[in-house]
Amino acid sequence: MHAIGVVLIQLSKVRTPIILVNFKTYSEATGRNALKLAKAGEKINRETDVCVGIAPQYVDIAPIVQAVSIPVFAQHIDPVTHGSFTGHVLPESVKEAGAVGTLINHSEKRLKLADIDAAITRAQEAGLVSVVCSNNSAVSAAVAALKPEMVAVEPPELIGTGIPVSKAKPEVVSNTVDLVKRVNPKVVILCGAGITVGEDVAAALRLGTQGVLVASGIVKAKDPYKALSDFAQAIIKT
Amino acid sequence: MHAIGVVLIQLSKVRTPIILVNFKTYSEATGRNALKLAKAGEKINRETDVCVGIAPQYVDIAPIVQAVSIPVFAQHIDPVTHGSFTGHVLPESVKEAGAVGTLINHSEKRLKLADIDAAITRAQEAGLVSVVCSNNSAVSAAVAALKPEMVAVEPPELIGTGIPVSKAKPEVVSNTVDLVKRVNPKVVILCGAGITVGEDVAAALRLGTQGVLVASGIVKAKDPYKALSDFAQAIIKT
Amino acid sequence: MHAIGVVLIQLSKVRTPIILVNFKTYSEATGRNALKLAKAGEKINRETDVCVGIAPQYVDIAPIVQAVSIPVFAQHIDPVTHGSFTGHVLPESVKEAGAVGTLINHSEKRLKLADIDAAITRAQEAGLVSVVCSNNSAVSAAVAALKPEMVAVEPPELIGTGIPVSKAKPEVVSNTVDLVKRVNPKVVILCGAGITVGEDVAAALRLGTQGVLVASGIVKAKDPYKALSDFAQAIIKT
Amino acid sequence: MHAIGVVLIQLSKVRTPIILVNFKTYSEATGRNALKLAKAGEKINRETDVCVGIAPQYVDIAPIVQAVSIPVFAQHIDPVTHGSFTGHVLPESVKEAGAVGTLINHSEKRLKLADIDAAITRAQEAGLVSVVCSNNSAVSAAVAALKPEMVAVEPPELIGTGIPVSKAKPEVVSNTVDLVKRVNPKVVILCGAGITVGEDVAAALRLGTQGVLVASGIVKAKDPYKALSDFAQAIIKT
């Protein structure tokens, strides 16, 4: 385990290895439930050296930041500035609410290429760590050329299946590591899709990633704290 | 002045005539500034019979609702449910954060027709008042057929200009009133674009609307409280 | 059977009742195959009073118009003018290639509401008959307010299933007829989704429509000419 | 001057250096006018060693291919297959109509990142040369990671201005050449925006590109043949 070198990440509370939990719009992770889940993550953050970050819905960012000490990410930002952008997610507003980073281009919220580039720039201007999602290794390499802090590769066909990318498609992960490192060795690489148990996380790290992006595997677990603890133990042992 | 008949509106704190202030992503209406602006609106709500509603950015909804007693609207919702919709705005999360309604299809966040229909349904299921924006009178009539609580007509070419729709294009407003009433007489009609002084609001009401959707006219006013007060006085005198 | 009153339709070769065949991107309806299918439609046009129109892919419009005398529709147009709109479908270019009309807002190519409004206007300016698709009766009424020549209601969940809308969801069709007629009695109403045999077409006409929008039911039939003939006979007998 | 090594390009009539003329939806380049313009390009192709390609509107592809011997590109394709994709541009239909390649992601028709990746793959499957547009050097490098045959960098703020990118922003072009070559040395690099005279083309080649993507500079020239000839002479002398 090692702290990564990117200045922006050092300044935030974000460290690697990281377990980044995407709350999506799951009922188990909305409003009061989101707060409960954030507390489980905070506990792991305190008890271990593993960094647990969470990406709740926009409206839940401020209440969670006020109540819990945990790195909070937005699920998306728009490449906009202060001005006439009704309904858009302004990086600065997410930052002022207390988030430290943001997902960009999740497979459920895909962006145009030029907008990914602009969103990464806007995130950096607002002091937010960018975690840009990709759907395969070639797209991961493309993303790396845009210089985000992290790229998270997730084959969309495995998302939500419980079939872990790190075991079912290890070549997607290892090719991503190879290609991304060649284009931009500073980028932190995560993988996701189908991750449900610690062993999936350990496999991901052995393939060269520095963490996982996970959603239903934690949010819909019977005991999310236990599931997170299992993930963290696997990381510590790897 | 009269309370409107739609059940959903009666249950919320929303009344007509209404001044609905869209905060967009203006720096004067983000984070701490959003809270200050909300307080100015709350004061008018207390001091007059005119309803002032505000539509801040998503992340500012919860902090404002906690601090200020004023009808809060989202600037947009997505027609999604609980589930796998990363980065989308779930109506239920907006409601749980304390919003009473939402803009839909603002000219800066236009939606596909089927999605407007679905978003109105989802807003109603979540207990949110729908204020659907339109760009001309024909589109207003189309929107009325989808049965939102309110339609707000705003010719996009006048937005942010300070040239009031109610004076520069009164026929857009009166045609909207005619066409919408024919399609669905229950829909509350607002107008917007270029509204900056009380007289613009009075003109809007004389044309048959029950209020205004306003943004820079209030947000960028030297003294937003004074500007709102001017609007409210004009309504009371009309 | 009667010729419909809209001037634009009278000027084109389009009559009602109409069988409008959407070629989509089916291999059976691309390039040379598209031409063959067009010829089957032309034969029905000659042999009966029923109007058969076809909507091939953009690149196939000109070759079909040159070879076959049949009303040809584009599958989509963009609400653009002559100018800097790379990759967009200009109504005038479709018209110059010989098309008489266009689908707008098919469920596989949904548009923003303001763009549907603008596309209908642009189609009329270019002399193209607009057939605007909708997914339910409320959306059909909304579309009718925008004054296209035709609206075609197609519940997306039945498209391509072989379960005919006119039999499985007759209330969607009859509600569409009711609501559309109230908003705009001049609009010709078609229905589609799951239409595969003449009896489905007859049922559609009995519900008050003036024709059908069909795709796989004809394109993927063993003998498209025979299938079209079965449709036409059902219309003539109704 | 040299033929480039990519197999797909060798098999088509596409050679470098290349002048690729985007017809957009200009009236001077629609229908009959498109055919006239194509003939001017054909003449240069015959008279010089410089390759002139054209990208007309979809409906004009087949008539041009039938009448003129010149490499024709689509302005866009969709990453779809044969099937239910109404209104989409199927690579195979463009190919069957006689096109040899396609623009992808032009700044007036931007695509989501995953769709650019899929469109390049679909173009290659259909035997079409991919010319992917980008708006700056970082995005060019990202595109190169997706392995198209060509990338064309065009700063959107210069498009249509007559201010040539190769003179006003030479660093955008040279940075693109550097970054793209590092990521994928096989990719042919073009540049565009503001190119109107031969000297702009010569400057582009001196910066390391193998041609230009041009629109109004040729299409709106008083004498397009003369303007093309000026471009070709500049290339031959460089």
Image: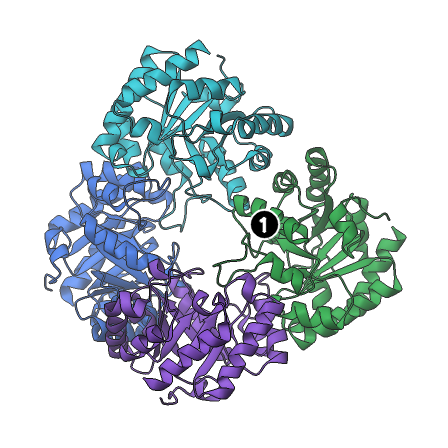
Chain colours: A green, B purple, C blue, D cyan
| Side of B221 where A188 appears, left or right | right
Q: Position of residue A21 (x, y in %)?
A: 71, 61
Q: Looking at the rendering, which quadrant does residue C146 occupy? A: bottom left
Q: Is residue C33 visible?
A: no
Label 1 marks a residue whose chain is A
Is B81 on the left-hand or right-hand side of C78? Answer: right
Residue A4 seen in this snapshot? yes
Residue at image location 49% in from the left, 72% down from the top: B224
The residue lying toward the viewer, choosing from A194 and B117, is B117
Image coords of residue D149 (percent x, y): 51, 28
- Using residue C167 as the reference point, say whether residue B232 is left or right of it: right
In the displayed structure, B91 sits above or below A238; it is below
- The answer to which quarter of the image holds residue B147 is bottom left
At a point 49% along the width and 59% down the height, the residue shown is A85
In the figure, residue B37 lies in which quadrant? bottom right
Front position in the image: B95 or C161: B95
The residue labelled by disc 1 is: A119
**Element class at badge 1:** helix
Above/below status of C102 relative to A143:
below
**Camera-side residue: B188 or C150?**
B188
Q: Position of residue D110 (x, y in %)?
A: 46, 44
Instruction: Count the labels in the image.
Output: 1
Looking at the rendered structure, the kind of residue marked 1 is: Ala
Within 10 angstroms of label 1, few (less than 14), some, or many (20 or more) residues? many
Residue C182 appears at what percent x and percent y? 22, 76
